[in-house]
Image: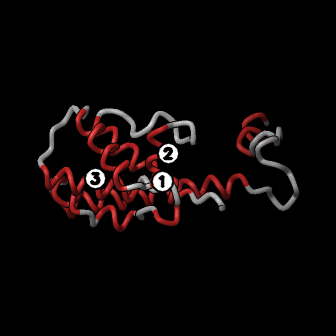
């Protein structure tokens, strides 16, 4: 499966939200050797219940039952090992948990969408900069000084 930066960002968002609320990462490493990662990958109902029970018990922040359920639904949708099943940014900004936690929903949604657009723009600019120019030079290994530097020397 080809790497998709947007779905990778959603996984990262899930990990960050998890750390912010629970106080530690959902797993030590996103690898088959990690028990909690295996649990996330298999999605077995009883294992997921154990995953959430143990992690919530160690949480530094106590949240009520409805908020806890909404948080779990959101993070579960982001921490899907299969990127095709992972939530996208639109479902995140419409999630019950974010809508109840965010003081001004419109401001919060607007901010998140703006940040995502900013990241996507930076990524596409970086991708464009990394493409080889028509003259065949590789910009990563090109030792030719920039035009501005040459102009300053003369």
Q: Percent position (x, y) of residue 145?
A: 78, 39
Mark 2 to mark 1 CA distance (whole Å): 6 Å
Residue 50, horizontal then vertical, whole percent: 32, 44
Q: Position of residue 60 (x, y in %)?
A: 21, 32
Residue at x 71%, y 43% (from the top left corner) = 148
| Disc number lying in front (2 or 3) | 2
Q: Nearer the viewer, mark 3 or mark 1?
A: 1
The quadrant holding residue 53 is top left
The residue most toward the right is 136
Q: Are marks 2 and 1 in contact (CB under 8 Å)?
A: yes
**Residue at the location (21% across, 62% down)?**
96
Marked residue nearer the N-terminal end (3 or 1)? 1
Instruction: List the residue tagged with mark 3.
Output: 72
Q: Badge 3 local density, few (<14 within 10 Å), some, or many (20+)? A: some
Q: Quadrant of residue 91?
A: bottom left
**Helix, strand or loop under label 2:** helix
Which residue matches tag 2?
38
| Distance from Cα at disc 3 to Cα at disc 1 | 17 Å
């Amino acid at each position: 499966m080809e790497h998709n930066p947007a779905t990778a960002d959603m996984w990262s968002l899930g990990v960050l939200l998890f750390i912010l609320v629970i106080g530690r990462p959902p797993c030590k490493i996103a690898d088959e050797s990690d028990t909690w990662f295996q649990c996330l990958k298999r999605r077995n109902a009883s294992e997921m219940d154990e995953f959430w029970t143990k992690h919530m018990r160690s949480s530094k922040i106590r949240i009520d039952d409805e908020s806890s359920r909404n948080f779990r639904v959101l993070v579960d949708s982001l921490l899907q090992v299969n990127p095709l099943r992972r939530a996208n940014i639109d479902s995140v900004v419409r999630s019950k948990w974010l809508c109840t936690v965010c003081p001004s929903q419109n401001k919060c949604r607007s901010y998140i969408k703006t940040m995502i657009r900013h990241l996507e723009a930076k990524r596409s600019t970086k991708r464009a900069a990394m493409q080889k120019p028509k003259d065949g030079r590789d910009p990563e290994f090109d030792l030719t000084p920039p035009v501005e530097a040459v102009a300053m020397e003369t």
